[in-house]
Image: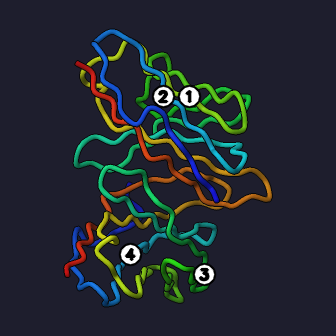
């Protein structure tokens, strides 16, 4: 019952922006969009989340379309350390369970 | 801030023995903790949710008598794998969420790799 769809993998160049798409066409008004990443053999790391508005923090920006059916995570200046699996997750407000899909394997190349 | 630790980081045990994994929130109080399992080349699967001072809620298909969870304080949850078998070998990851007024996201520990011989 995957609620999000992400590309299986993508490459990006070091120093360039990385744009990671996510489709969540069945999202409800009471559901957040969350992004986590998992570097090999480590626990997931929280990146950013949003409800309707675009969000930015020290790690990334999250752009959510007006109809909320898709979003894009932007890593402004990718480094080799950003190589990881990135998970886009839809989560109901006040239900804190996270359901991880397969994610996007991002490889940053020098 | 929002650091979660796990101990041990890896453990090897013989089949039939029990293994306890600790999950601690180091700089915040975690009213809710979650336990996940991740097999090689697969995604994380939620095993159970525990709230401080109450019994854990297990996901469908997870044996509560085999995976004992205790959340006795606001900074500590433990997962005990009882009578472990080779098929229990996996990467076990905990996460913690702060209470009311705290941050809304889950923060994850570094994981514990369990190998059962």
**Residue A23 circle label:** 4
Mark 4 vs mark 2, foreground winner is 2
Question: How far apart in space, not on screen, are marks 3 and 2 (Cα)?
Answer: 38 Å
**Residue B78 circle label:** 1
Q: Which residue is mark 2?
A: B21
The quarter in which the C terminus of chain B is drawn is top left
Is A2 drawn above or below residue A49 in the view shown?
above
Name the residue: 42% across, 19% down.
Answer: B19
Of B100 and A16, nearer the camera is A16
Q: Position of residue B103 (x, y in %)?
A: 69, 61
Q: Mark 2 packing: few (<14 Cα in 10 Å), some, or many (20+)?
A: many
Name the residue: 24% across, 76% down.
Answer: A108
The reply to whether dot 3 and dot 4 touch (C-beta < 8 Å) is: no
Mark 3 vs mark 2, foreground winner is 2
Q: Is residue A29 left or right of residue A77?
A: right
**At numbered mark 3, what does the secondary structure look like: helix, strand or loop?**
loop
Q: Mark 4 packing: few (<14 Cα in 10 Å), some, or many (20+)?
A: some
Q: Position of residue B74 (x, y in %)?
A: 72, 38
Q: Is residue A98 left or right of residue B77?
A: left
Mark 4 vs mark 1, foreground winner is 1
The reply to whether dot 1 and dot 3 touch (C-beta < 8 Å) is: no
**Residue A52 circle label:** 3
**At numbered mark 1, what does the secondary structure look like: helix, strand or loop?**
strand
The reply to whether dot 1 and dot 2 touch (C-beta < 8 Å) is: yes
Q: Is residue B11 left or right of residue A66?
A: left
Is B27 drawn above or below residue B23 in the view shown?
below
């Amino acid at each position: 019952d995957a609620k999000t769809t992400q590309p299986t993998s993508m490459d990006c160049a070091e120093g360039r922006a990385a744009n990671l798409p996510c489709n969540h066409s069945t999202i409800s008004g009471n559901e957040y969009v969350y992004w986590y990443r998992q570097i090999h053999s480590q626990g997931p790391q929280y990146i950013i989340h949003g409800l309707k508005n675009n969000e930015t923090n020290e790690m990334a920006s999250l752009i959510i379309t007006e109809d909320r059916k898709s979003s894009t995570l932007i890593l402004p200046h990718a480094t080799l350390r950003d190589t990881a699996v990135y998970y886009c997750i839809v989560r109901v407000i006040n239900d804190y369970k996270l359901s991880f899909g397969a994610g996007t394997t991002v490889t940053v190349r020098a | 801030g929002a650091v979660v630790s796990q101990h041990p980081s890896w453990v090897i045990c013989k089949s039939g023995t029990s293994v306890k994994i600790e999950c601690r929130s180091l700089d915040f109080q975690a009213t809710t903790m979650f336990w996940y399992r991740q097999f090689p080349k697969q995604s994380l699967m939620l095993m159970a949710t525990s709230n401080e001072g109450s019994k854990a809620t297990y996901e469908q298909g997870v044996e509560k008598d085999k995976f004992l969870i205790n959340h006795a304080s606001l900074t500590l949850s433990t997962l005990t794998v009882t009578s472990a078998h080779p098929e229990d070998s996996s990467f076990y990851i905990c996460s913690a969420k702060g209470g009311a007024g705290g941050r809304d996201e889950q923060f994850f520990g570094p994981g514990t790799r369990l190998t059962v011989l």
